Image (cartoon, grey):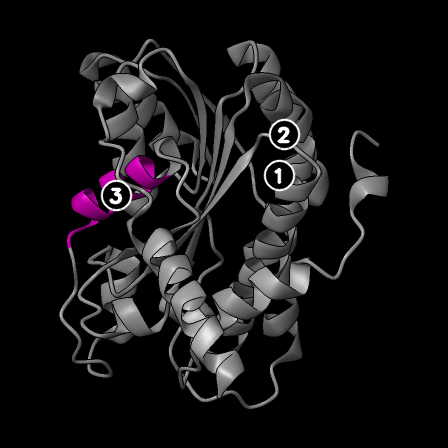
């Protein structure tokens, strides 16, 4: 009991700091002149992020599979006031493309300040019946390509003290039926990027990582997938896109968006946060600093 009495005030201060420390106000000029990559940008949330960034005066690089859609988005970004707008078409199923894309984008933009990872492979809501190729494809596109892209971008982001923004889902924080392959890939994002965030923190790598936990968003693909299955109210993709950008600009660890209700609070899991905090103290990380 004496130990708990000592621990509770520490816990209270720690949680208060975690929940209320991100008080800096977002200003659109934070993105003015910034060099930003948005993947999965031909439609939905990715397209809306490109438009927001353009209106903020950023240099925008978009990628997706559809070259025709990207051409139109680049033209509209320039009309909206982007400092510059570019595209490179390709599929994230090809890891060679993913790595080369970042190198090409960096040369075109002249560096990189923010990498927004938003693409996913197509998914339907149905019981899992052993479709191993679907599991493999989901992991490769929704997870492994994110790792490839972020590691390829890291040297540029270190130079700019930049940011990695990872678009994830409630299905990557809690078990959900009918989306097992998709959910597995989103859980993997949390495990990898949350671990990398801790490594960067203790080894003094000034690159922020923001994990975005989204509820149901009213993109065409999401609405088609949940039709007749899920009764949850969807949130607007335009507002969602803006919240993702804000979170990255403010270097927040996590962003929660959507009609999540109590899930917003519960998914933050203060128990996990506390365990990670104390667990990190048992590691000798000094040997890795500046390596």
| Res 73 → quadrant | top left
Above or below residue 251? Residue 280 is below
Work out which quarter of the rendered image holds the C terminus and state it. top right
Residue 163 at x, y percent in the picture: 49, 32
Image position, residue 62 (x, y; %):
43, 29
- 256 vs 274, left or right, is left
Residue 275 pos. (x, y %): 57, 70
- Predominant secondary structure in magenta? helix
For the residues labelled 1 and 2, the Cα–Cα distance comes to: 5 Å
> Are circles 1 and 2 on residues that touch, CB within 8 Å?
yes
Marks 2/3: CA–CA distance: 23 Å
Within the magenta stretch, is there residue 245?
Answer: yes
Q: Is residue 280 above or below residue 204?
A: below
Q: Which residue shows up at 25% across the image and 65% down it?
A: 216
Q: Earlier in the sequence, mark 1 or mark 3?
A: 1
> For the residues marked 1 and 3, what is the alpha-carbon distance in whole angstroms?
21 Å
For residue 153, the mark is 2
Left or right: 81 as drawn, with respect to 3: left
Q: Is residue 265 above or below residue 240?
A: below
**Which region is colored magenta?**
236-247
Q: Could one spot residue 268 in this view of the protein?
A: yes
Residue 240, x across and y down, in percent: 23, 48
Q: Please name the residue that numbered disc 3 is placed on.
A: 243
The structure residue drawn at horizontal position 18% and vertical position 71%, both measured from the top left corner, is 261
Q: Residue at x 28, y 64 (%)?
A: 215
Q: Secondary structure at mark 3?
A: helix
* Residue at mark 1: 150
């Amino acid at each position: 009991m004496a130990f708990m009495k000592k621990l509770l005030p520490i816990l209270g201060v720690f949680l208060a700091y975690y929940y209320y420390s991100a008080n800096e106000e977002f200003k659109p000029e934070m993105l003015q002149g910034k060099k930003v990559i948005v993947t999965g940008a031909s439609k939905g949330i990715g397209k809306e992020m490109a438009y927001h960034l353009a209106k903020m005066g950023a240099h925008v690089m978009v990628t997706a599979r559809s070259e025709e859609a990207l051409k139109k988005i680049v033209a509209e970004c320039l009309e909206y006031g982007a400092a510059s707008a570019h595209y490179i078409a390709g599929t994230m199923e090809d890891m060679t493309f993913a790595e080369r894309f970042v190198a090409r984008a960096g040369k075109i933009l002249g560096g990189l300040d923010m990498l927004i990872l938003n693409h996913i492979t197509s998914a339907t809501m149905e019981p899992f019946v052993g479709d191993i190729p679907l599991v493999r494809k989901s992991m490769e596109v929704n997870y492994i390509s994110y790792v490839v892209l972020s590691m390829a971008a890291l040297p540029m982001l270190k130079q700019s003290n930049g940011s990695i923004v990872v678009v994830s889902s409630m299905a990557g924080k809690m078990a959900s039926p009918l989306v097992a392959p998709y959910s597995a890939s989103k859980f993997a994002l949390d495990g990898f990027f949350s671990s990398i965030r801790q490594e960067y923190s203790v080894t003094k790598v000034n690159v922020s990582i923001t994990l975005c936990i989204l509820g149901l968003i009213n993109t065409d693909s999401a609405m088609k997938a949940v039709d007749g299955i899920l009764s949850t109210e969807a949130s607007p993709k335009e507002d969602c896109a803006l919240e993702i950008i804000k979170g990255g600009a403010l270097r927040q660890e996590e962003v929660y968006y959507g009609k999540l209700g109590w899930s917003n609070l519960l998914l933050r899991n203060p128990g996990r946060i506390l365990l990670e905090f104390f667990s990190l103290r048992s590691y000798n990380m000094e040997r890795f600093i500046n390596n």
